[in-house]
Image: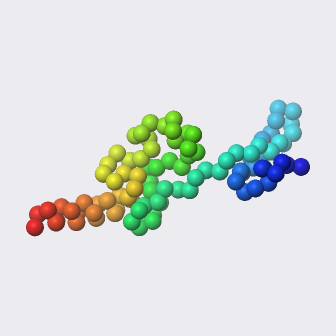
Amino acid sequence: MPRGMFKSGRLRKIFVKTPGGRNTVHYRSRKPSKALCGNCKKQLAGVPRELPSKMANMPKTAKRPERKYGGTLCSACTRALLKVKARGESQ
């Protein structure tokens, strides 16, 4: 019978086969939700979906794309925003 903390939906079950041939259940925390664009709510490419402990050990360049608004806006919204800004400056 699992302990109370393992019965909630906070942890996910991982079935592991032991060297003795038995299957045991390991519990790991769930991954966070996918990063979304702040404008159109589309899933962001190039942003990893990892546990906070793994994200802390990752280099900054691996956490989001190396461009303006990287990690907050998708490429299509970024392109549209930069076009609007460029047109506004020229007038």
Horizontal side of residue 60 vs 30, given as left or right: left
Front-lying residue, 88 or 22: 88
**Where's residue 54, x and y in %?**
55, 39
Q: Residue furthest left?
A: 91
Q: Image point 50% across, 47% down: which residue?
A: 48
Height in image: 17 above or below 39?
above
**Where's residue 59, x and y in %?**
44, 36
Name which quarter of the figure residue 20 lies in: top right
**Where's residue 1, x and y in %?**
89, 49
**Where's residue 52, x and y in %?**
56, 44
Height in image: 18 above or below 77?
above
**Numbered label tally:** 0
Q: Image point 74% across, 45% down: which residue?
A: 27
Image quadrant in which the C terminus is located = bottom left
Height in image: 49 above or below 61?
below
Q: Residue furthest top?
A: 19
Q: Residue furthest right?
A: 1
Q: Image point 28% across, 64% down: which residue?
A: 80
Front-lying residue, 72 or 4: 4
Horizontal side of residue 41 vs 86, given as left or right: right
Horizontal side of residue 74 vs 30, given as left or right: left
Please name the colour scheme applied to the rendered image. rainbow
